[in-house]
Amino acid sequence: MEEKREQIAEGLWCNVRKFCVRINVLVIMGCLLSSCSPFRAIDLLVDRKGYTLEKEQSYGDNPSMRMDIYFPSNHSNINEDIIMFVYGGSWRSGRPFSGKKEYYRFVGKLFSNEGFTTIIPDYRVYPEVKFPSFVEDVANAVKWIHKNMDLTNDNRRLILVGHSAGAHIVSLLALDPNYFNEVGIDRSVLRGWVGLSGPYNFNPLAIRYIRPIFESVINDIDKARPISFANVKAPPGMLIHGKRDRLVSVNNSLALYKALTAAGNKIEYQAIDAGHFDTVLGLGVPLIGKSEVQSTIFRFFRSLE
């Protein structure tokens, strides 16, 4: 009898999960049909519980240099470290997947629910600026955190997480010491970093719609290629990439992983059955069950303790 009840309960729970998935799919499809960003679609499914949001904190003079800060509401589960998430969008405005910090509330909620104060900055993009200005903007955001949020080497440090163009920015900050040196801080403020589907071993001058963004390095392309700095001592890192990524080849992550490993750096690599955008959409908490992306990231976080 007990076994029968368990079978019935499991059947009911399975139906509930299927129903929730259908509802989520309908919401997402409706949003996409109305030309809504898929990140905004996931965001619509996220409740506003579990965090306190401080919006539009300035870290520079430009209107784009603003960030949202998610503070955990559950004070019994506070992690001392801070997470900064850097979204992608091809380093430019006006494209279907161009980013805005408001679209990534689901990321802020996910990490704050795990006890991390989470910061999501906007930053300047093309055509307003070209490389390396957007990397410098995020470095200045880190400088603001260091100054205003007690970011010390002993107790509280920063974990950088980035997707796509954001992963490119995060990896340059983690690997090229010049960016932090220019704003007067040391890379030791970083506990670790995570790159999701990033272009680390690419030639931006060979891609027509990206070439104007990187004209400043036409004579020294390696400055824009994270893999060029793999031989520098770096903080621990985690690379996650979808095997079905048609926008940024998984070979980017594999090549950087091999280069960092050969240089003696602590780096992990996980290729998953996913496309380019799945790696960040997998952070969407309304999905049923924890995604492989989430479990991989939190396992990496635990390894940093």
Image: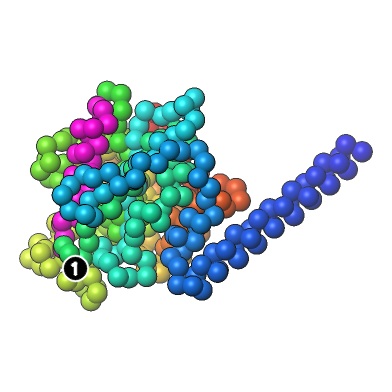
* Residue with the mark numbered 1: 127
Residue 102 covered by magenta stretch? no
Asked if residue 90 is positioned above or below residue 171 in the image, the reply reads below
**Residue 14: percent from left, percent from top:** 73, 52
Q: Quadrant of residue 35?
A: bottom left
Tell me: residue 77, above or below residue 166.
above
Mark 1: few/some/many CA within 10 Å (<14, 14-19, 20+): few
| Residue 300 image position (x, y, % from top left) | 42, 39
- State how the image is colored: rainbow
Asked whether residue 148 is drawn in magenta, I would say yes
Residue 277 at least partly seen = yes
Residue 149, percent across and down? Answer: 27, 31
Is residue 175 in sight in this rendering? no
- Using the image as rendered, state which of residue 73 and residue 29 is in the foreground: 73
**Direction from residue 121 to residue 32 in the image, left or right:** right
Position of 291 compared to 239: left or right?
right
The range drawn in magenta is 130-152
Quarter of the figure with the N terminus: top right
Which three-letter amino acid code belongs to the residue tagged 1? Pro
Q: Position of residue 52 (x, y in %)?
A: 43, 38
Left or right side of 134 for 45? right
Asked which secondary structure carries label 1, the reply is loop
